Image (cartoon, rainbow, N blue to C red):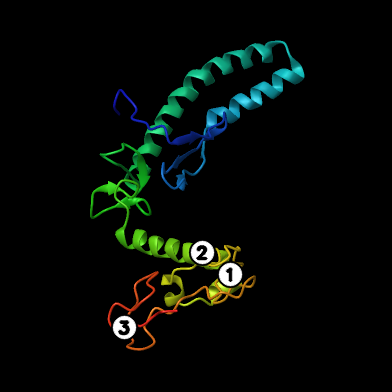
């Protein structure tokens, strides 16, 4: 048995004066392993002495005091041995990441291929799937946030320049309309020449191909 006990911070000591038990936890996912309760025989004897002293006092009380002092030293020694054995038993189930120094469970949080914990070297397949799911969720929320009218707009509608006011009377337009509801002026101008079919430049009064007046 070594003079020192190797230990980690990610464990809970569940020991009592009746025996010893420990649980070790993964720093990443929180899952862990709990050792089986290991009874301490002397603890039962000391407990019996404590009960007897409370009932009868006198000489038994003095014996109980001696038993308590014996228990303190013996319990600590037994506790150290139990902790050392527990660490040895569960150590193969945990790995310390060389990058972040976290102790993680080998089962779920260790990237065997990379030799790092999955916090430092995540599984690419998992990350790709999560990214796709996140993008799908964003699209769902974006679609849900659109008005019913906008949901029916095509890609061509979105690419078209949408005016906010009438080009004739400057009245505000409630939606993407072809004619102003106030003065009746045409809001959406034809983008092709009626005579030759050439594409018209925005705001042009005459076709640059055939000279036809646009309006």
Callout 2 environment at 10 Å: few (<14), some (14 to 19), or many (20+)? few
Give whichever of discs 3 and 2 has the lower sequence position: 2
Check disc 1 and report its element: helix, strand or loop. Answer: loop
- Compared with residue 206, is residue 145 higher up or lower down, i.e. above or below? above
In the image, residue 193 lies at what x, y percent?
Answer: 36, 83
- Compared with residue 191, is residue 17 higher up or lower down, i.e. above or below? above
- Compared with residue 40, is residue 112 higher up or lower down, i.e. above or below? below
Q: Nearer the viewer, mark 3 or mark 1?
A: 3
Give whichever of discs 2 and 1 has the lower sequence position: 2
Return the mark for residue 20.
none
Check disc 3 and report its element: helix, strand or loop. Answer: loop
Compare residues 45 and 84 and report the one nearer the observer. 84
Quadrant of the image occupied by residue 198: bottom left
Q: Which residue is mark 2?
A: 142
Circles 2 and 1, Cβ within 8 Å, touching? The answer is: no
Return the mark for residue 175.
1
Check disc 2 and report its element: helix, strand or loop. Answer: helix
- Compared with residue 79, is residue 58 higher up or lower down, i.e. above or below? above
In the image, residue 206 lies at what x, y percent?
Answer: 36, 77
Give whichever of discs 3 and 1 has the lower sequence position: 1
How far, Cα to Cα, is label 3 from label 1? 28 Å
Residue 81 in the figure: left or right of residue 100: right
- What residue sits 57% from the left and 32% below the top? 18
Q: Residue furthest right?
A: 55
Residue 6 in the figure: left or right of residue 39: left
Residue 180 in the figure: left or right of residue 209: right
Q: Which residue is mark 3?
A: 198
Callout 3 environment at 10 Å: few (<14), some (14 to 19), or many (20+)? some
How far, Cα to Cα, is label 3 from label 2? 37 Å
């Amino acid at each position: 048995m070594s003079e020192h006990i190797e230990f980690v911070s990610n464990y809970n000591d569940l020991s009592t004066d009746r025996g010893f038990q420990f649980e070790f936890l993964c720093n990443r996912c929180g899952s862990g392993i709990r050792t089986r309760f290991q009874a301490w025989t002397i603890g039962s004897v000391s407990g019996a002495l404590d009960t007897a002293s409370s009932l009868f006092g006198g000489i038994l009380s003095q014996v109980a005091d001696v038993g308590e002092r014996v228990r303190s030293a013996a319990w600590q020694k037994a506790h150290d041995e139990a902790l050392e054995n527990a660490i040895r038993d569960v150590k193969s189930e945990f790995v310390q990441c060389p990058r972040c120094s976290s102790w993680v469970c080998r089962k779920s949080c260790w990237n065997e291929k990379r030799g790092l914990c999955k916090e430092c070297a995540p599984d690419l397949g998992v990350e790709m799937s999560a990214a796709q799911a996140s993008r799908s969720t964003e699209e769902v929320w974006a679609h849900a946030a659109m008005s019913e009218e906008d949901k029916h707009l095509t890609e061509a509608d979105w690419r078209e320049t949408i005016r906010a006011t009438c080009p004739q009377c400057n009245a505000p337009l409630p939606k993407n309309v072809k004619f102003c509801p106030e003065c009746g002026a045409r809001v959406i101008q034809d983008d092709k020449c009626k005579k030759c079919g050439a594409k018209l430049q925005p705001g042009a009064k005459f076709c640059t191909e055939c000279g036809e007046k646009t309006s």
